[in-house]
Amino acid sequence: MTIQEAQARVDEWIKTIGIRYYNELTNTAILMEEVGEVARLMARIYGEQSFKNPEQAQSAPAELADEMADVLFVLICLANQTGTDLSAALEKNLEKKTIRDAARHAGNAKLKP
């Protein structure tokens, strides 16, 4: 699915299943909560923290994917609410990064394999 299709599908879901969008401030708070859940899993899967139960580690990759999808869903909600075309915004952002970072990353010794 394209980003534009995702924005349309989320909008349709909100209007039919979700009844209406939460306000922008509420969705921003929800986004922060969802990002925190991704961070919690990243710290346990890839970082130095451990799971309370070893069984949790087995389902962690699927849980991480679900939490990342939650982040994307709420971000799309905010984009829809603010009239942001995420496809256009990402294209513009990649252009900015390409111009700004072309030489910077190539010359960064910390990034050498």
Image (spheres, rainbow, N blue to C red):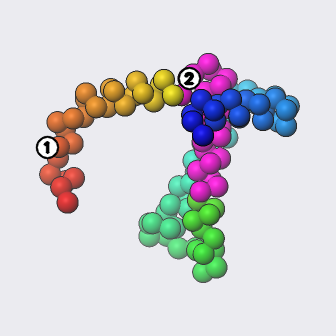
Depth order, front residue of 40/71: 71
Disc 1 residue type? Gly
- Mark 1 Cα-neighbour bin, 10 Å: few <14, some 14–19, many ≥20: few
Expressed as whole percent of the image width and height from the top left, the position of residue 57 reads 58, 74
Expressed as whole percent of the image width and height from the top left, the position of residue 86 reads 54, 28
Q: Which residue is mark 1?
A: 107
- Mark 2 Cα-neighbour bin, 10 Å: few <14, some 14–19, many ≥20: some
Figure check: 107 above or below 78: below
Expressed as whole percent of the image width and height from the top left, the position of residue 5 reads 63, 32
Q: In the image, is residue 69 part of the stretch drawn in magenta?
A: yes
Figure check: 49 above or below 106: below
The N terminus: image quadrant: top right
Location of residue 103 by image quarter: top left
- Residue at disc 1, secondary structure: loop
The C terminus: image quadrant: bottom left
Depth order, front residue of 36/6: 6
Expressed as whole percent of the image width and height from the top left, the position of residue 112 reads 18, 55
How many marks do you count on the picture?
2
Q: In the image, is residue 36 part of the stretch drawn in magenta?
A: no
Using residue 61 as the reference point, say whether residue 80 is left or right of it. right
Q: Which residue is mark 2?
A: 85
In this orientation, does residue 93 appear?
A: yes
Depth order, front residue of 83/32: 83
* Mark 1 vs 2: CB contact within 8 A: no
Q: Which residues are magenta?
A: 65-86
Using residue 41 as the reference point, say whether residue 9 is left or right of it. right
At horizontal 48% and vertical 23% (from top left) the residue drawn is 88
Residue farthest to the top, as pictured: 83
- Residue at disc 2, secondary structure: loop
At horizontal 82% and vertical 36% (from top left) the residue drawn is 18
Front position among marks 1 and 2: 2
At horizontal 60% and vertical 80% (from top left) the residue drawn is 54
